[in-house]
Amino acid sequence: MEDVIIIGGGPAGLYSAFYCGMRGLSVKLVEGSSQLGGKLNFYPERIIWDLGGVEPRPAKEVVAALREQAATFPTKVLLNQAVVALKQQAEHWQVITKEGQVHEAKAVIVATGTGMVAKQPVIWGDAQAPQIDYKLATAERYRDQTVLLYGSFAKVKRALKKLTVAKKVIVFGAEKKFPAEFTNLHVIPEPLRVTVKEVENQLAVTLTFPGENVQPLLVDCLVAFQQVNHAHPLKSELSKRFEISEFGQVTTLGQGKTDLAGLFAVGDASQYEGKMNMIAGAIYEGLQTANQIAVYLNNEAEPVGKVSTHHPELLKKL
C-alpha cells in the first residue's frame, strides 16, 4: 500500500508527485490517458509564461521538465487507467479504475483537472486528404495558396499571423470580427453542413446554408483546428460526496484539504475563494498538499518540508 495515490498526471499531479517524494512519501500516480502532461499536451507549441523564474517555453518542454522532476523520487506511474470510484476504508482509501483494478493508499490526491481532453476528429468526407492540416504547418506550406481555415476565434486569429503569405484565406466558424490588417481574409457565415472531396491536388468543399443554399469552394488547403471532447470519469463519483462545479471541481478547505479525511484535491480539480487558475498556482497547491499529507500520516512530521537545496536525497544527485 502506498502512502499517496495521485489521480491525474497533469502539472498539478506531476508536481504533487515530486513534492510528496520530497516529504519521503511513497507515491502511485494513476492517469486515465496514454501520456502525462494533462491539457498541456493539447497545445504543445504554445508558449507558457506563468512559471516564475523560468524562461517562457513551449508547453511540450514544460511537460518534459515536469515529468523529469516527478521521476526524481520513485513513483509508480500507471497510464490508461481511468479512475471511476473511490471507497473510504477505516484507515485508507481504495481507488478503483474503469477496468475494475483496485489500488490502495493512506491518502488520495485528486488532480484530475476538469477531466481528460481528447481531440475530436473532423469528419468531412476526405478527412485524411493530404491537403487537410489539423494543426498549423510552417508558413511556407501556405504561400500563394487559397486556404480554408476552421476553428475557434482565438485559434483562427493566431493562425492568421502565419497565413499572411497565403493568396487568400477563407474563414467560417469564427463568430467575431477580425482586425483590418488581415487583408487577404474573406469571412463567410457558419454553414449547416460541410463536405470535402479531393480533386486533382485540391479540395472541393461544398457548404450548405439554411434554405439548402449550396456554395462550392475550391481551395488548396484546409486547416481545421479540431474541437475537443471532455471526459471526466470521476465526476459522477465526486458528485456523490461533494457539491461540485459543472466541470467536476471540488470545493476545498484550503491547502488541498477536503472535508473527508485523507482525500485532497489540487489544481483545476479544486476550487476555493482566491483560487489562482495558473500552472504556478497548481504547483503551489501540490507543495502545500504534500505537506498536509505528511502531517496527516505522521503528526510528528515537520509541517513544512526542506527546500530542495537542503534536501539530503537531492544533494546526493549533485
Image: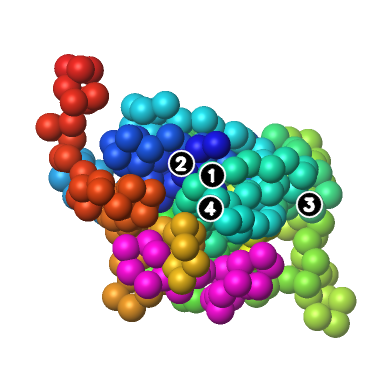
Distance between mark 3 and mark 4 Cα atoms? 50 Å
Disc 1 and disc 2 in contact, CB within 8 angstroms:
yes
**Quarter-of-image position of residue 126:** top right
Distance between mark 4 and mark 2 Cα atoms? 11 Å
Q: First in sequence: mark 4 or mark 2?
A: 2
The label number, if any, that marks residue 169 in the structure image = none
Distance between mark 2 and mark 3 Cα atoms? 45 Å
Q: What residue is shown with label 3?
A: 123
Q: First in sequence: mark 1 or mark 3?
A: 1
Quarter in which the C terminus is drawn: top left
Q: With 308 as the anchor, is 203 left or right in this view?
A: right
| Residue 74 % position (x, y) | 42, 26
Q: Is residue 162 visible?
A: no
Q: Amino acid at mark 4?
A: Glu
Disc 4 and disc 2 in contact, CB within 8 angstroms:
no
Q: Secondary structure at mark 2?
A: strand
Q: Secondary structure at mark 3?
A: loop
Q: What residue is shown with label 4?
A: 91
The label number, if any, that marks residue 105 in the structure image = 1
